Structure formats: structure tokens, C-alpha cells
Amino acid sequence: MSPAAVLAAVGAALPPHTVSNDDLAARMDTSDEWIRSRTGITSRHVAGIDQSTADLAVQAAAQALNGSYSPGVDALVVATTTPDRCCPATAPTVAARLGLTGVPAHDVAAGCTGFLYALATAAGLIAAGTAETVLVIGADRLASLPRPDDRTTVPLFGDGAGAVLLRRGDADEAGALAPIVLGSDGTCADLIAAACPGTLHMGGADVFRHAVERMSTASRRAATAAGWDLAAVDRLVPHQANSRITSFVARRLGVPDARRLSNVAHVGNTGGASIPLLLTQAHADGRLQSGHRTLLTAFGAGLPWGAVALTWPDLTHPTEGAGHDR
Ligand code: ACO
């Protein structure tokens, strides 16, 4: 049997400063009611100028490592759309700050799907025999991308990081990643774009349509690849773009809303951090428990998409202290 990548620990980090919808309404032409009804978001965490993407990544990774029995880390992958610098990549700096100087470390750029692409990269490193354990981190400061007065994009985004540790294991054990489904459509690259450097532009309605379609299709394929019927899914963990998108996806898949995990209300869209941040919070507060058949799916600027299934493992160390928002 070929080796599998098995989830062994989770961690997350959120900047302490929060910005509510009312705070936004005080400085632009919007309202709490408009934002909540369109997106499900009520507040978001926003990093100060003294908190970089690397800072958030290190904090999330350190928490994952604290909650792990793993003896070491052989490689590190950071998924981010908001690296601290265009060059060099963020990952080697993060590795060095974690005391992992010398391990292979690189960034993955795949928008809000970056975490799933990074999982696939890490699983490949394990399958290739390059690494036994890989830290996969999603970290973004998306709140810094929109033009500060753009009411159509500012309310959507927040900052944060999430991390998981993958170890080499067997395909039939809890935590093993089933085949990861990935795709992209660069013909729609202009739907969500930010110049380098520059501000974000988004065609909201088209993004909405693509997000629902691509995440639903990828989720179906990932469930099939895992040998699951969709009715067997206990927890759907969609990229937290906004709650209308994720509830449409759940409905399309026939997954009851009670099984759709969400934290978007208090963190907004945190890009590559979205899924590992939600996994960490849901694991900490019991929404995600050992044995739950869990389906992850994401969609992002590019347009890339992806999905993967795993049975949630028994993570024996608690991870309280990660963001506790829901
Ligand atoms: N407050 C008040 N009014 C607003 C705001 C705001 N914050 N933003 C836009 N409006 C106005 C618009 O100007 C427009 O006014 P008009 O009719 O006078 O022109 C009106 O509200 C309706 O605007 P729409 O864009 O049609 O609003 P819609 O109902 O489509 O909701 C939204 C917009 C929430 C962005 C929706 O299109 C959406 O969810 N799109 C998905 C985008 C997304 O989640 N992207 C995340 C990044 S990409 C990713 O993560 C994959």
C-alpha cells in the first residue's frame, strides 16, 4: 500500500484587533444589516502594521506543533496570497523562526484554495519519500488588499492563519487524506484580481456563481474518490467566503445545514487561512470530533478550486487557545 498523508495536529492564530460592521459603517456608506444579510459576517480580525503574514503563520504553526506528538518536521509549505514581500517566499522565514532552518520550505499561491493546493503538495512530498512530516500553513492578511474606502470588498475580508501537521501513515487510518481533487480556470482570472502592488477588484456576482458551482462539483468528486456517499458526510468544511455561498453549496450537495461548519461571522474571509482556522476552532469546541467524515472544499482567485475528504482523527492534545470565535 502506498503511504498516505495523515493529519496529526492543528493550530490557528488571529490578530487581537477586531473590526465590527458598525465600525465599518462609521467610515463608509454601508450598514451592519447590509453586510450581515449578504455575507453572514458581523466582524473580522485585522492585523496591525506590526503583525505580518509570517508572524501569523509562525503563531499558528507553533500551536500545531505544541499539540503534536511528532518528533520533528521535515518540510514546510505556506499557502498565502499576501506574502510579506514579493521575493523571497514567506515559508523559509517561517521555518527559520520555528527553529526549522534547513528543511525544504516554499510558498503556494492559489488564492483562497491555497491551503488545499498546499495539502496536495505536502502529500506529494510524503509520497515521494522527501518528508515524513510536513507543516502546512495557510496565512493571509486579506484585509489589507481592498482600497480602504471600497464598500464592495472591505467588509468581506479578515486576517488570520491556520496550520496542520501531516505525517506519513496508512490510507486506512483516521486522518488520512483521500485523493485530493484540484482544478483551475484561468479564463476567469480577472474576476478577482489585485495588481502587484495594488488594490483588489472583484466581480461579486460572477464570483458567487463560480464559487457555488466549482465547490459543489469538486466536493462530489472528492467524496467519490474517498468512496463516500454524500449522505455519509458528517461535516462540510467549505472555504469561508461568505455564508450565502457556503449554504448554497451545502444545499446543492444535499448536506444538512447543521453539518456545515462556519466561522465566517466572526472572522470574515481569511483566504488561505480559512479552512485550517475553522478546523482548529471546530476541533477545539467539539463541533469536529474523532470519526466525523469530513469534506473540505475551497475556491479562490485564479480561479482555482479543490476538495478533499478525511475521517477526523483522534487528536489527543487539546488545541484550546486558538481563535475561539465561531
Ligand atoms: N453596503 C451597502 N451597499 C453595498 C455594499 C455595502 N457594503 N456593497 C455593495 N453595495 C451596493 C452596490 O453598490 C449595489 O448598489 P446599486 O444597486 O445601487 O448599484 C447593491 O449594493 C447591490 O450590489 P450587488 O453587488 O449586486 O450585491 P450582491 O447582493 O450581489 O452582494 C456580494 C454582493 C456580497 C459581494 C456578493 O456578490 C457575493 O457574495 N459575492 C461573492 C464574492 C465573495 O465572497 N468573494 C470573496 C473573495 S473570493 C473568494 O474567496 C473565493
Image: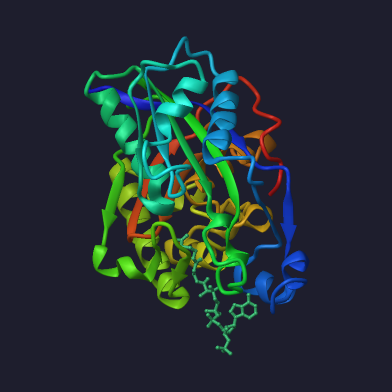
Instruction: Tell which quarter ligand 1 is in.
Output: bottom right
Can you say whether 56 is above or below 231 in the image? Answer: above
Residue 98: percent from the left, percent from the top? 51, 20
- For image coordinates 26% across by 62% down, the residue present is 185
Report the number of numbered marks: 0
Q: Nearer the viewer, residue 324 or 47?
A: 47
Residue 139: percent from the left, percent from the top? 50, 41
In the displayed structure image, the side of residue 58 where residue 48 appears, left or right? right
Residue 100: percent from the left, percent from the top? 44, 17
Can you say whether 183 is above or below 101 in the image? Answer: below
Res 322 → quadrant:
top right
The colour mode here is rainbow
Q: Nearer the viewer, residue 129 or 230?
A: 129
- For image coordinates 46% across by 21% down, the residue present is 96
- Evaluate whether residue 164 shows in this view: yes
- For image coordinates 39% across by 57% down, the residue present is 196
Residue 248: percent from the left, percent from the top? 49, 68
Q: Quadrant of the N terminus?
A: top left
- Evaluate whether residue 7 shows in this view: no
In the displayed structure image, the side of residue 148 where residue 121 appears, left or right? left
Q: Nearer the viewer, residue 222 or 11?
A: 11
In the displayed structure image, the side of residue 182 where residue 80 appears, left or right? right
Res 151 → quadrant:
bottom right
